[in-house]
Image (cartoon, grey):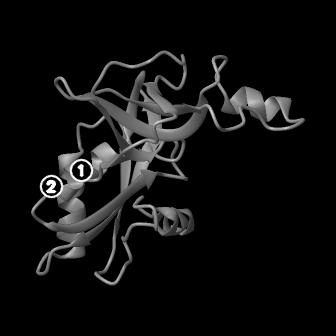
Amino acid sequence: SNLLFYALAPDVEARVADPETGEKVPYGTVGELQIKRSTRSTSYINKPELNAASWTADGYFKTGDANIAVQLPDVMVLIAFCCRYLDNLIGKDGNRHWAFQVEAAVQAMSSVLDVLVAADPKNPQGFAVGAVPQEGISSEELTRQIMEAHRDSPYNIRVFVLDSTYDTSRTAISKRDRKGLIKLAHKI
């Protein structure tokens, strides 16, 4: 799974909200993680525009990260990190489409060894899909299978077949490192 669950410090309040309306989203719905901490500043000094973009009226910091809040029976709320919100979301057909959802679907294909997906820098209505094929699967076959699986999707995709030496590792804080894929997508 590409989800990363984490615990918050006792003095941190967190919520998952609709990034456009600021309203808290229902459990199980992807939204932006917003946090408030009593021991931290709630503004940038002499930066009113940055403050307006970064903080809610009630003092929550807008992280820009896509998360899902899950309520466990009689226990607690878990928050799972999905992806960077601004970098891995496209809006099309009145809906939001997340890179991590496309990535999970491609990763589940038997012909795929590993995959990275990011919003396509050359196509604001699509995703760049970088996939490493399983041994014995040709680049052409992998591309055909991925394109066929997404034929009826409301978003566009560009497939980049990567060799097994391509680094699809995670960063030091366990986020998928998509910068190389985005650079590749810019070149092609």
State the image coordinates of residue 93 (x, y, percent, origin top left).
Answer: 40, 24
Left or right: residue 119 versus residue 60 is left
Residue 140 is left or right of residue 83, and the answer is left
The three-letter code of the residue at mark 2 reads Ala
Q: Residue at x 63, y 17 (%)?
A: 58
Q: Is residue 172 visible?
A: yes
**Residue at image coords 67%, 28%:** 55
Looking at this view, name the residue that lies furthest to the bottom: 165
Percent position (x, y) of residue 157?
A: 36, 50
Q: Quadrant of residue 98?
A: top left
Q: Is residue 60 above or below residue 101?
A: above
The amino acid marked with disc number 1 is Ala
Instruction: Give the label on residue 104, or none.
Output: 1
Residue behind mark 2: 108
What residue appears at the point 13 percent right and 80 percent down from the top-left corner?
A: 135
Image quadrant of residue 46?
Answer: top right
Q: Disc 2, disc 1: CB below 8 Å? A: yes
Q: How many marks?
A: 2
Q: Which mark is residue 130?
A: none
Query: Secondary structure beneath disc 2?
Result: loop
Q: Give how far apart the Cα atoms at labels 2 and 1 are.
A: 6 Å
List x then y, in percent, for residue 169: 37, 71
Question: In the image, what residue occupies the spot 54% across and 16% down?
Answer: 21
Whether residue 18 sits left or right of residue 111 in the image: it is: right
Res 125 visible: no
Looking at the picture, how far across and down is residue 109, in whole percent? 13, 58
